Amino acid sequence: MSQICPISKTCACRNVARCRIQEAGRLFLWFPVPHTLTKVTSYLEQFALKYELMQERPGLSLNCRTGQSLEIARNLAKLLAPRELKETQVLFIRGTTQPQIHDFSDIASLQRFIQLNQSDWLVEMLAAERFISYFQPIVSINDTSQIFGYESLLRGLDEQGNLVLPTPIIELATEAGLLPQLDQVARLSTINQFSRHQVSGHIFINFAPTSLYDPVFCLRSTVEAIDTARISHDRVVFEVVESDSPQDLAHLKAVLQYYRNAGFLVALDDLGSGYSSLNLLHQLRPDFIKLDIELIRDVHQDLYKASITEKLLEITQKLNIQTVAEGIECIEELNWLRERGANLAQGYLIGKPSAVPTTTTHYFDPIALTIASANSQVVEQVQHQSESERIVAAVTQHIRQSLELDEILQTTAAEVRQLFEVDRVLIYQFEPDWSGLVAVESLAEGCISILGFHVMDTCFQSSRAVYFQEGNTRAIEDIETAGLSPCHIHLLRSLQIRANLVVPILQQERLWGLLIAHQCHNSRQWQQSEINLFNQLASQAAIAIQQSELYHQLQQANQELQRLACSDGLTQVGNRRCFDHTLKTQWQRLAREQGSLSLILCDVDYFKLYNDTHGHLAGDDALRHVAKAISQTVKHPADLVARYGGEEFAVILPNTDIERAIAVAKNIQTNISALQMPHPHSDISEFITLSLGVATIIPHSQLSPETLIAAADQGLYQAKAQGRNCVVQMDCKDAD
């Protein structure tokens, strides 16, 4: 081949070619849109570089002297937007020959072209196979002296034999298209070195699914190496890194199925660090999951991490999936995970990675934690605890029975009033401007209510905020003898306050509010033990409040994750997963209620011609406009607009008969027509149009949702056969 830096579409696992782009030759560039071509030609003309335009599509070619092609490519990278950099295609031909047919398989993106030609050190490392595997022990979490297996961790070696950490290696290999070569070298290195040490237990091997074009071909050498080393297949666990964001889920499933068919085990690595953790857990159903180090770090004292990790452990226990907690560095993390049912442990507390696998690990005795969990940090009773500690524990249990803020505050006020036998207990909450109001109140008979009382004290921040932020308490035995100003005494009398005790509710260093006890009719001498107990209860209330706020933040985050999981990234309408779930749910509901369910399938007419004419960027914009126009047609909250695939959209209409469904379909046509998006190569209109198939059914248990889909799809097929830009109804009432 003429080009020396191949990035072919066939498996290149064993092909590590050195780049000779420093030689003279001809550089060919193809651009995603004419706008990009204009920017590049302006740059070339600015530096008097001669070029030849291509007629078939936006592109050009130019002769380059030795080393000039890479210089031009780097300068263009500064000029183009990131998407243009990825979508601009490059071919470099050495010498003066014209490209042949076989050369076009070597076309690469401009971004990859640059990275590959800056990767000489990595190419040399791959060619010489200068890599070593380090092994980190994975142990039973209940008996850390029992080694379950080892994770293999890749390290590079420079020309002097010094270690090169994996991050720069993997980043450059990914950008330069060398991941297949790196992935294979890493797998074979792991297997050879692991077998040489002859240790027992499992071996966990990372792999990049996007680096495998054909599982059977690409993994043949891996399986042969495992068999040659006489390692039993059920001892080998292949880890797919979840944050690798595989674009082709079907391909990933095929890779894992190949592993499973060969008797290997599968792990989902770094759960919680990537873009679709729960979706991949559902789709791949691994034998192991590895909880990401960022979730494990300080999990015993981070309520947010604790809530997420507890839920993940609950899910995996129900699904009988073993969990490996990565990155454990302290005994508190180990104990927290042990108490919540994690299976295996890995981290510097257990053992550091080493070139020679360690065969012994330390046994850590279980240590009971005083805080049981992030969701219910109830102080547990221990032997010989004092009376006040038992009271705090009992009251705390009542406070923590809910995660709703209003219930927490009300329970706190009621419990404290009963415990201290005072006339009134209230919780005063501050606003950002230091005004505030009485948010909650517990009141004895004969006392007036001040619930909702609002105070705007402009001097509070300067006079008393710092005092309470430092955790100080204020106790007044009798307002008449406390030396208060006359206006202050008048205010307290009007609120029916004779004695009070005020302690701060702190959220770290933030003064969230005040917990206040009132005697309404008589003075009271506050004992120091009462003040101390009052402070402890305020601290427990503060923890419960923070827990509630974090819980609701987690709920909001989960709702946003759910929205993103069900949303099409391009058009922002529902995605195929959302469509399938909604159709199934509505089918089951309407089967019980015997209501009508309608479905409209829409397809943009001659969309491939539109893309070929205007480019994929314009095509994406067109799909966004179409999705918005369809969404504006749908009025009822239960209706759903989803991207069914490519340029095809679906509209689910629960409780909608065929007449109303046809009316919706025609309104969709009207809205699309109003967009007047030019489509000069369409055979039926100068603007973008839709073909639509409509079907309605009353669901029942003898049928499935596929019956309705098939009918609507048949209607769409007939709409296209009848000339497109029309609505065709299919009757599926008699489907069986």
Image: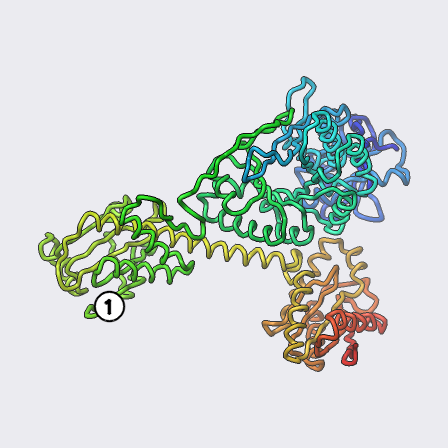
- Total labels: the figure holds 1
Residue 305 percent across, percent down from the top left:
50, 47
Residue at far top of view: 160
Q: Nearer the viewer, residue 10 or 57?
A: 10
Q: Is residue 147 above or below residue 288?
A: above
> Looking at the rendering, in which quadrant would you find the N terminus?
top right
- Which color scheme is applied? rainbow
Q: Tag 1: residue type?
A: Ser
Q: Is residue 127 above or below residue 333?
A: above
What residue is at 68 percent from the left and 41 percent from the top? Answer: 239
Residue 230 percent across, percent down from the top left:
78, 32
Is any part of residue 103 visible from this angle?
yes
Residue 213 percent across, percent down from the top left:
79, 43
What residue is at 64 percent from the left and 53 percent from the top? Answer: 279
Residue at far front of view: 383
Q: Is residue 703 above or below residue 557?
A: below
Residue 540 percent across, percent down from the top left:
34, 51
Residue at far bottom of view: 659
Q: Nearer the viewer, residue 359 or 277?
A: 359
645 sits to left or right of 299: right
686 sits to left or right of 634: right
Q: Which residue is mark 1?
A: 449
- Identify the secondary structure beneath mark 1: loop
Is any part of residue 461 visible from this angle?
no
> Looking at the rendering, in which quadrant would you find the C terminus?
bottom right
**Label 1: few (<14), some (14–19) or many (≥20) C-alpha neighbours in 10 Å:** some
13 sits to left or right of 531: right
